[in-house]
Amino acid sequence: MLIAPVMVDGAELLPLGSTLSGHITSVRRVGLGIRHETASLGFAFTSVTLPNGQIFPLFARLTQVDNGRERVNRDGRIQGVRSTGSMAYRASG
């Protein structure tokens, strides 16, 4: 669900409360931490439902997450943080 309207050149393209629909395209778990040190999650958005119920096809790519730890890579996948990169890990080591 959009928590802020999508604006293009000062005009509202998608209103607040619109719902994006799609599917998960990729999941990668951490594993043993040798080759895959971070988890990742990919999405494909295929439609948007406006608050008034209208549905439109959509192709969108994730560019940012509203969180200070994870990041979004060039492919639009959410990339987790390394477990060894935390202050707690460093302090315990």
Image (spheres, rainbow, N blue to C red):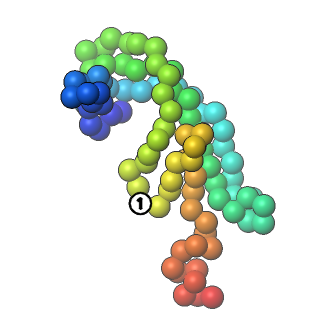
* Residue at the outermost left position: 10
- Report whether residue 72 is seen: yes
Answer with left or right where residue 70 lies relative to residue 1.
right
* Position in image of residue 20 (x %, y %): 42, 27
Q: Residue at x 57, y 56 (%)?
A: 80
Specify the amino acid type for callout 1.
Answer: Gly
Instruction: Provide the secondary structure element on which disc 1 rests.
Output: loop
Q: Residues within 10 Å of mark 1 (few under 14, many from 20)?
A: few
Q: Quick one: quadrant of the N terminus?
A: top left
Answer with left or right where residue 24 lies relative to residue 59.
right
* Position in image of residue 33 (x %, y %): 73, 65
Q: Residue at x 59, y 34 (%)?
A: 24
Q: Is residue 89 above or below residue 75?
A: below
Q: Residue at x 51, y 79 (%)?
A: 87
How many numbered marks does the figure carry? 1
- Res 91 quadrant in image: bottom right
Q: Residue at x 60, y 40 (%)?
A: 75
Q: Quick one: quadrant of the C terminus?
A: bottom right
Q: Is residue 27 above or below residue 87?
A: above
* Position in image of residue 63 (x %, y %): 47, 41
Answer with left or right where residue 29 lies relative to residue 7.
right
- Report whether residue 15 is seen: no
Q: Is residue 73 above or below residue 86?
A: above
What residue would you read off at disc 1?
Answer: 68
- Res 25 quadrant in image: top right
- Res 27 quadrant in image: top right
Answer with left or right where residue 27 lies relative to residue 77.
right
